Image (cartoon, grey):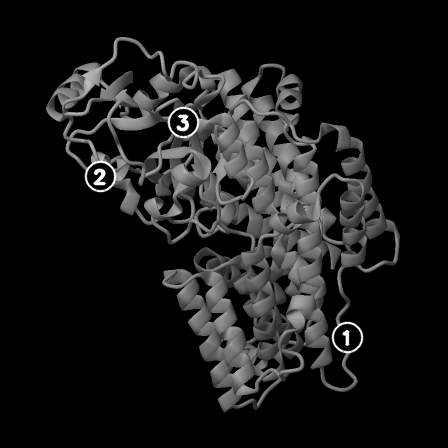
């Protein structure tokens, strides 16, 4: 048992950086990837991590494996593997709601075993929207069970989520600092956690089958999915945007001559301006700097009486029919769509007006939804956050083009064509190849996964530009930059000192009590900081506590890694944040459904890890 360690200056600095990371991740004053880079630089300047090892995280097995997994997932998405899932799920459910929920959660849970959790959630959001529109079931009855099972399914393999991918790198770092003669800790194979993950996923499926009918939100404002043919009614019922499309002509004597669209929209009582025609050129979503001249025609949305009053005030002429924009507003070509801002979006922290979505993509932002709040006025100056829902209007083709940048995830079921269905067999074959190599060969996991990714690139499933775009660079930088912090926790003795102090306070307690305390502490860390941050901090600490108590460190390391995913109640979990806004979940909804599941997660994890190890 370790004893006699005193707190050194290096330990204090590492603990200070760890505390700083925890606080900054919680407050979100600065982007998480910038905080991680700042910590990396501080470790280098202080000399705690040698400069020749400082950037090893960027070439680490964990980072390469995550990048390969993201590319594989993009290849499956590009060929339409997942977009056909809606019809299969509906067919398997045979019209029964409980069976539908079971099939949906089972398929998404298993899929998350081999893809990043956030990617699976983003890919299945439109699938669930299609199911919702076909069955009439509100999104609030489907999305949270799906999201929770995606998190649970991520524990089935060592590539399902970032904490498990990180674990082996952290274990290897601890092995380098073990005292002479001490036994090294074995790393984990691809499916070594499968029995534990299977027990967790089955527990989640049983939980939602038996208890979800009593726990699901039951409100009058439950959100239905908009379909292309129901645009107008959805505007009105969900966001209070009502009325019809009216065409207005700007005569030479109008007060609006020489004003920009942005200036016109700033005027009192201006209806929503959705289209413009100048000369023979017509388009949806006129850009903010578009000027109005004589004979310009506007397509506006609002109650007809209010539009007439506003047109009279501004000297505009109301045209009798929608001759200029009728085809453009056809529901099969254009309409409303909801899109969620994901954790890796470049939109986060930017104002809606600064995104210039109308000019770049031909998309108008009509409202912003955040939790229970909906903003419809002065939205150009609204700062966006992770999980916000943008209510947009534009052509479906333009929406699909804008969605390719992955700065938002379209929730709406809208008409679109699959891009490369003829490459479907190639995508499935190379994905299967990577899984077989990971399971049956002695190749390192990153090499096995990259084999499938390179195969997809060579056969045209993806091009290299699409592969680059598929990688969530924010996640990569956070992980690669925080890995040295985990090394420093162990190499400076900070983790061993914390272990010594914890054992001193707790005294002689059973192993299960130590494990339970670590699981609870890690789960709390995961509530306020990223699961990656919680893993980096807690794995070295858990291993040192086990060593100090003369216990096997392997189950301790695995327990805290799994516990880093035990967050079903907070939008700090990016999976939960993606589904919270589209389904209008309130904080109490998440706590009511997620808190019991968190307790089940902790109990099942403790039992299964100790049974196996």
The residue to which callout 3 is attached is: 283
**Marks 2/1: CA–CA distance:** 68 Å
Please tell me whether mark 2 or mark 1 is closer to you in this view: 2
Residue 210 makes an appearance in the image: no
Give residue 432's quadrant in the image. top right
| Residue at x 63% of width, y 15% of height | 94
- Of residues 377 and 569, the one drawn nearer to the viewer in this rendering: 377
Residue 15 makes an appearance in the image: yes
Where is 272 relative to 71, above or below? above
- Considering the image in quadrants, where does the C terminus appear? bottom right
Where is 72 relative to 215, above or below? below
Q: Which element is circle 2 on? A: helix
Residue 291, how many percent across, how many down?
Answer: 28, 36
- Of residues 438 and 204, the one drawn nearer to the viewer in this rendering: 438
Please tell me whether mark 1 or mark 3 is closer to you in this view: 3
The residue to which callout 2 is attached is: 263
Q: Are marks 1 and 3 in contact (CB under 8 Å)?
A: no
Left or right: residue 500 versus residue 221 is: right
Instruction: Choose the circle earlier in sequence order: 3 or 2.
Output: 2
Q: Residues within 10 Å of mark 1 (few under 14, many from 20)?
A: some
- Of residues 22 and 567, the one drawn nearer to the viewer in this rendering: 22
Give residue 591's quadrant in the image. top left
The residue to which callout 1 is attached is: 184
**Marks 3/2: CA–CA distance:** 19 Å
């Amino acid at each position: 048992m370790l004893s006699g360690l005193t707190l050194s200056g290096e330990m204090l600095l590492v603990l200070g950086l760890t505390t700083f990371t925890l606080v900054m991740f919680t407050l979100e004053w600065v982007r998480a990837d910038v905080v991680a880079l700042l910590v990396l630089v501080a470790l280098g300047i202080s000399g705690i991590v040698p400069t020749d090892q400082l950037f090893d995280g960027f070439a680490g097995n964990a980072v390469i494996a995550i990048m390969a997994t993201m590319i594989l997932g993009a290849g499956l998405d590009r060929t339409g593997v997942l977009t056909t899932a809606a019809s299969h799920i509906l067919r398997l459910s045979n019209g029964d709601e409980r069976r539908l929920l079971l099939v949906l959660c089972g398929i998404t849970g298993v899929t998350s075993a081999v893809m990043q959790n956030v990617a699976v959630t983003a890919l299945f959001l439109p699938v669930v929207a299609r199911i919702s529109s076909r069955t009439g079931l509100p999104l609030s009855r489907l999305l949270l069970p799906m999201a929770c099972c995606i998190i649970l399914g991520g524990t089935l393999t060592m590539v399902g989520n970032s904490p498990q991918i990180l674990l082996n790198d952290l274990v290897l770092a601890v092995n380098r600092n073990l005292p002479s003669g001490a036994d090294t800790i074995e790393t984990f194979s691809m499916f070594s956690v499968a029995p534990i993950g299977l027990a967790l996923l089955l527990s989640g499926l049983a939980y939602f089958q038996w208890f979800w009918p009593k726990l699901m939100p039951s409100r009058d404002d439950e959100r239905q999915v908009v379909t292309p043919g129901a645009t107008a009614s959805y505007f009105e019922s969900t966001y209070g945007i009502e009325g019809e499309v009216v065409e207005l002509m700007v005569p030479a004597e109008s007060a609006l001559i020489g004003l920009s669209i942005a200036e016109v929209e700033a005027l009192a009582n201006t209806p929503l301006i959705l289209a413009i025609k100048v000369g023979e050129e017509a388009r949806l979503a006129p850009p903010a700097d578009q000027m109005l001249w004589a004979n310009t025609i506007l397509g506006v949305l609002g109650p007809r009486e209010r539009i007439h009053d506003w047109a009279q005030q501004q000297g505009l002429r109301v045209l009798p029919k929608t001759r200029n924009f009728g085809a453009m507003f056809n529901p099969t070509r254009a309409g409303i769509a909801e899109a969620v801002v994901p954790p890796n979006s470049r939109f986060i922290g930017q104002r809606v007006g600064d995104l210039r979505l109308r000019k770049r993509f031909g998309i108008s932002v009509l409202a912003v939804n955040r939790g229970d709040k909906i903003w419809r006025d002065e939205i150009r100056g609204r700062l966006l956050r992770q999980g916000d829902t943008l209510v947009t209007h534009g052509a479906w083709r333009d929406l699909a083009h804008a969605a390719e940048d992955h700065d938002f995830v379209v929730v709406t079921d809208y008409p679109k064509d699959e891009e490369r269905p003829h490459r479907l067999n190639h995508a499935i074959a190379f994905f299967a190849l990577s899984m077989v190599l990971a399971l049956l060969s002695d190749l390192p996991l990153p090499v096995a996964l990259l084999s499938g990714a390179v195969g997809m690139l060579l056969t045209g499933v993806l091009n290299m530009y699409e592969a680059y775009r598929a990688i969530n660079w924010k996640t990569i930088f956070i992980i690669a930059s925080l890995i040295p912090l985990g090394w420093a926790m162990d190499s400076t003795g900070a983790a061993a000192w914390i272990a010594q102090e914890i054992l001193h306070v707790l005294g002689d307690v059973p192993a299960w009590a130590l494990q339970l305390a670590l699981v609870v502490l890690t789960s709390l860390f995961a509530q306020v900081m990223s699961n990656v941050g919680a893993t980096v901090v807690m794995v070295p600490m858990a291993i040192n506590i086990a060593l100090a108590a003369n216990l096997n460190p392997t189950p301790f390391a695995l327990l805290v890694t799994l516990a880093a995913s035990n967050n079903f109640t907070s939008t700090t979990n990016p999976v939960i944040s993606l589904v919270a806004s589209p389904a209008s979940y309130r904080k109490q909804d998440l706590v009511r459904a997620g808190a019991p599941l968190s307790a089940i997660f902790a109990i099942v994890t403790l039992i299964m890890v100790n049974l196996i190890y």
